[in-house]
């Protein structure tokens, strides 16, 4: 049986306007996105680890992410310095993972009804994410009504 694919939120405005693009080179940004993908697929979401309490050796993680060990090490050091990750004996922790994901772990797609999550961002907009089937229908009707008015 195929494992359900996981997903995570990413806010482009935060990347481009609020700092990460300033602190990280293009290569380092790519490594950080791959780290977030690994954290999303990890047994403990938000923590990059082989198994609970078992961190990846750096060579293995570099191979998994398909990056050179030197750029991985440089990126991890920089991310830790600016407070985007922490490292300990359990693995690499993405700082504020739960907060960035709306306060809850994103549900796997196609598994039951999900509760609505409202998240107010510093820019003043709200995201409506992970809704029930009825909410999706209602949202589509509202969107069609708004589009028909313009």
Image (cartoon, rainbow, N blue to C red):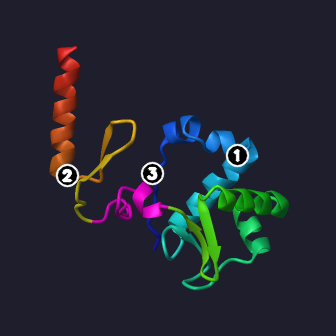
Earlier-in-chain disc, 3 versus 2: 3
The answer to whether residue 149 is above or below residue 56 is above
Residue at 61% in and 44% down: 20
Q: Nearer the viewer, mark 2 or mark 1?
A: 1
Q: Horizontal placement of 9 versus 140: left or right?
A: right
Quarter the N terminus occupies: bottom left
Residue at 62% in and 84% down: 54
Can residue 98 be seen at all in this image of the molecule? yes
Mark carried by residue 24: 1
Mark carried by residue 9: 3
Quarter the C terminus occupies: top left
Please say if the residues under marks 2 and 1 sit with CB atoms less than 8 Å apart.
no
Q: Position of residue 146 (x, y in %)?
A: 19, 23
Q: Position of residue 71 (x, y in %)?
A: 80, 57
Q: Quadrant of residue 55?
A: bottom right
Between the residue at mark 3 and the residue at mark 2, the CA separation in whole angstroms equals 20 Å
Earlier-in-chain disc, 3 versus 1: 3
Mark carried by residue 121: none
Pointer 2: residues within 10 angstroms few (<14), some, or many (20+)? Answer: few
Residue at 30% in and 65% down: 111
Can residue 5 be seen at all in this image of the molecule? no
Question: What range is drawn magenta here?
Answer: 96-111
Pointer 3: residues within 10 angstroms few (<14), some, or many (20+)? Answer: few
Q: Nearer the viewer, mark 3 or mark 1?
A: 1
Secondary structure type for disc 2: helix
Principal SS element in the magenta part? Answer: loop
Q: Along the line of sight, which residue is nearer the eye, 135 or 110?
A: 135
Q: Is residue 116 magenta?
A: no
Q: Which residue is mark 2?
A: 133
Q: Along the line of sight, which residue is nearer the eye, 108 or 68?
A: 68
Secondary structure type for disc 1: loop
Q: Position of residue 94 (x, y in %)?
A: 55, 64
């Amino acid at each position: 049986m195929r494992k359900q694919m996981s997903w995570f939120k990413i806010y482009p405005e935060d990347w481009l306007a609020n700092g990460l693009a300033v602190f990280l080179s293009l290569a380092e940004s790519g490594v950080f996105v791959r780290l977030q993908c690994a954290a999303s697929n990890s047994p403990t979401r938000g923590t990059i680890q082989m198994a609970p309490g078992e961190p990846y050796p750096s060579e293995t993680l570099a191979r998994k992410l398909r990056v050179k060990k030197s750029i991985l090490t440089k990126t991890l050091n920089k991310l830790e310095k600016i407070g985007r990750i922490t490292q300990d004996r359990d693995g690499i922790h993405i700082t504020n993972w739960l907060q960035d994901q709306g306060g809850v772990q994103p549900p796997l797609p196609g598994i039951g009804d999900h509760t609505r999550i409202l998240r107010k961002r510093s820019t003043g907009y709200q995201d409506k994410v992970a809704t029930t089937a009825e909410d999706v229908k209602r949202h589509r009707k509202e969107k069609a009504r708004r589009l028909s008015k313009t």
